[in-house]
Amino acid sequence: MNELNGMALICFSHLRWNFVYQRPQHLMSRVAIETRVFFFEEPYYGDTVHFEIVNPIKNLWVVIPHLVNGISEGEAAIHQKEFIAGLMTTMNIKEYILWYYTPMAMPISEHLRPEVIVYDCMDELSNFKFAPQALKYWERKLLKKADIVFTGGYSLFKAKKNQHHNIYPFPSSVDLKHFIQSRQGLEEPFDQANIPHPRFGFYGVIDERMDLDLITGIALQREGWHIILIGPVLKIKQDELPRYPNIHYLGMKSYAELPQYLAGWDVAIMPFALNESTRLISPTKTPEYLAGGKQVISTPIRDVIRDYCTVVHFASTVEDFIRVAENDIAYDFSWLGNVDELLKQNSWDKTWKDMRDIMHRSLYIKTNKFLQINSKAHV
């Protein structure tokens, strides 16, 4: 069975569709090839109550609630429930799947009666800075209601596996065709073109997960090295960011632009801090950097070690990082061959196919149980 039998999918996400292109966008864009997807974002707060719907790709609609500043949580939930009810009527949504990235959507959706409930736990959100206090409470409720739980990596799977009976690890995948463009000598972006080499590059969200001391130490000890940081700055004040002539903040770039920037780097880096917020992460950028043909230096993140220890270099201190960069990196065909072999079976297409197969099995089991109960009731 290769389709969702006409069932719509309603996705509740803490990440906005037009934010950094990550797991939700990769998966939901593939779901939209098979059925309608309604991507429900968290609210914006302003002067009016309304909701807007945009249609960025075929078969996928982004639903954006707008609420009034200062509104209570109860009122906010009532409005969003009304939005959902109106959406389901307007778009003629009858049979559907609920897909959660955030447990904080439970108050506005737990009254719904979907065919299947999926919790795609891509991160341990409760470990992130400024996480809502109620997040753990709502996650417990979601875990009780969910038919299926997916996790964004193996460390997260181990942390959650005893909390649900039907849970599966799905580490970050890669769009190989997109990032392999970086190996083909793409035109240099204007804002990177004049940055000297060697270049050490990072793209992604710049937040509390970044080891700013590590970045500072590298910049100070190797003034001829240039560190390029691409992405939005969140939960960090601008005056907390290290500012030196050889650190370059290029801002947020579109997903389409990333291969151009990656192509111009000498080394890709993942300078994550080793703290609670990174303990269970599985960075999407790891296979993307490798697909682009770039050597990678990462701090020792558990899932990166588990999945990529044969092709990624690890360093936890400034001294280690410098030593690895100066002595351990060798560009040869055997390394690239190992990368290509490792990534050969790693794709978002395959991830979605495997997830869909699990959903079909769960739906079949759930439906059979339902039919058995009904048949007994009529004996």
Image (cartoon, rainbow, N blue to C red):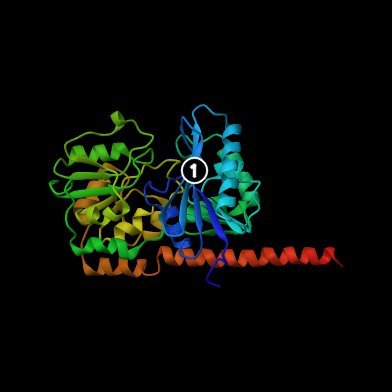
Amino acid carrying mark 1 in the image: Leu
Tell which of 52 and 179 is nearer to you: 52
Q: Position of residue 324 (x, y in %)?
A: 24, 52
Q: Which residue is mark 1?
A: 125
Q: Can you say which quadrant of the picture contains the C terminus?
A: bottom right
Percent coordinates x, y for residue 26 in the rendering: 41, 57
Comparing 293 with 367, the one in front is 367
Q: Residue at point 25% right, 69% down?
A: 334
- Between 134 and 281, the residue placed more toward the observer is 134
Horizontal side, residue 277 vs residue 189: left or right: right
* Residue 117, above or below 3: above
Outermost residue toward the front in this view = 90
Residue 213 percent coordinates (x, y)? 30, 36
Residue 126, placed above or below residue 333? above
In the drawing, does residue 90 fall left or right of residue 364? left
Residue at the image position 30 percent from the left and 57 percent from the top? 289
User: In percent of the image, x 27 and y 45: which residue is there?
Assistant: 230
Please tell me whether residue 106 is drawn above or below residue 3 in the rendered image.
above
